[in-house]
Image: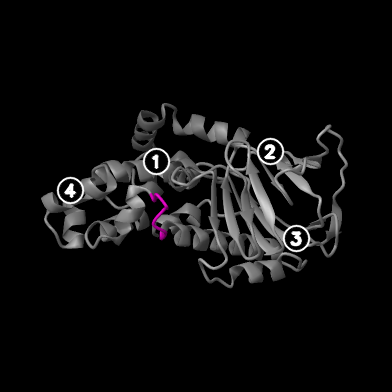
Amino acid sequence: MDAVAGLLDGPRARGAFLLRSSMDPPWSLRIQDQAPLTLVAIVRGEAWVVPDAGEPTRLGQGDVAILRGPEPYTVADHPATSPQVVIHPGQRCTTPDGEETGPMAELGVRTWGNSPDGATVMLCGTYQLHWEITRRLLRALPMLLVLDHDAWDSPLVPLLAAEIVKDEPGQEAVLDRLLDLLVIAVLRAWFARPEAQAPAWYRAYGDPVVGPALRLLHNAPEQPWTVAALADATGVSRAALARRFSDLVGEPPMTFLTGWRIALAADLLREPGATIGSVARQVGYGSPFALSTAFKRMRGISPREHRAAALAV
């Protein structure tokens, strides 16, 4: 598992909200659903993203954007168009005055808008849940990142556009996986750009010494890793690995491993039927007590308290 795959490998999309919007101007959508991550792909026409704080950004045909929540924003045919619909948590839609109806209507399978053959057609995929592993990467993203159509070459947007309107057995799982793939592809392309400020541990994946060590920690956190064991596995001395890892990642190997294990544990504790004992074994702690001690030291609450709070959301 590498850094970007780790974003979605455990907390991958499960019943993510996906929608095809077909619009003729004037149109304007106020988004205040508090979702942690939303992807927008323009299939036809154009749209403007207008954050509450910041300059409007135009999206043209073929462009893909990722928006990091929970701050609200507006998507419209033009920055000056006043919102007609407000999208709340749970994808509940109202007019700006709070009425449950508005100018948009269902136009087919997962299709919504004010025109069945609109001048603008866009695909939206929204992740509804907050996951600990996701936060590790999302913290490095701007509120809005845009990949221009000529900045990357991917067949995923046309494939998602073709699949999103189908109503077949297993379609939800197909769409979830396509959304995951598209998000990973966009983030990978984004972090390769010089203006992107990728986190240190992401950049370190390209290092011939630290990169393999990071992959070992990500892929097998349940193993009883030590700096000496990592050094043996990567073919360098213990001192050389410890020094280079700290220089490139910003923290020692075992500190990084503890943070990764606790992030994994925080997500695994959300799973139905998970126990503190089973999660402890999966993330490299020999007993529920050992996990509880490390978890409370880092998070200030016990795994049991964390699980209760997560399930109550």
Q: Amino acid at mark 4?
A: Ala
Q: Amino acid at mark 1?
A: Ile
In the displayed structure, 102 sits above or below 238; it is: above
Magenta residues, as a range? 192-198
Disc with the residue nearer the chain's start (2 vs 3): 2
Q: Are marks 2 and 3 in contact (CB under 8 Å)?
A: no
* 3D distance between C-alphas at marks 4 and 1: 21 Å
Q: Which residue is mark 1?
A: 262
Rendered image: mark on residue 32: 2
Specify the quadrant that holds the N terminus: bottom left
Q: Main secondary structure of the magenta part?
A: loop
Q: In the shown orientation, is residue 105 left or right of residue 238?
A: right
Q: Nearer the viewer, mark 2 or mark 1?
A: 2
Specify the quadrant that holds the C terminus: top right
In the displayed structure, 171 sits above or below 142; it is: below
Disc with the residue nearer the chain's start (4 vs 3): 3
Rendered image: mark on residue 242: 4
Q: Residues within 10 Å of mark 3 (few under 14, many from 20)?
A: many
Quarter of image, res 207: bottom left
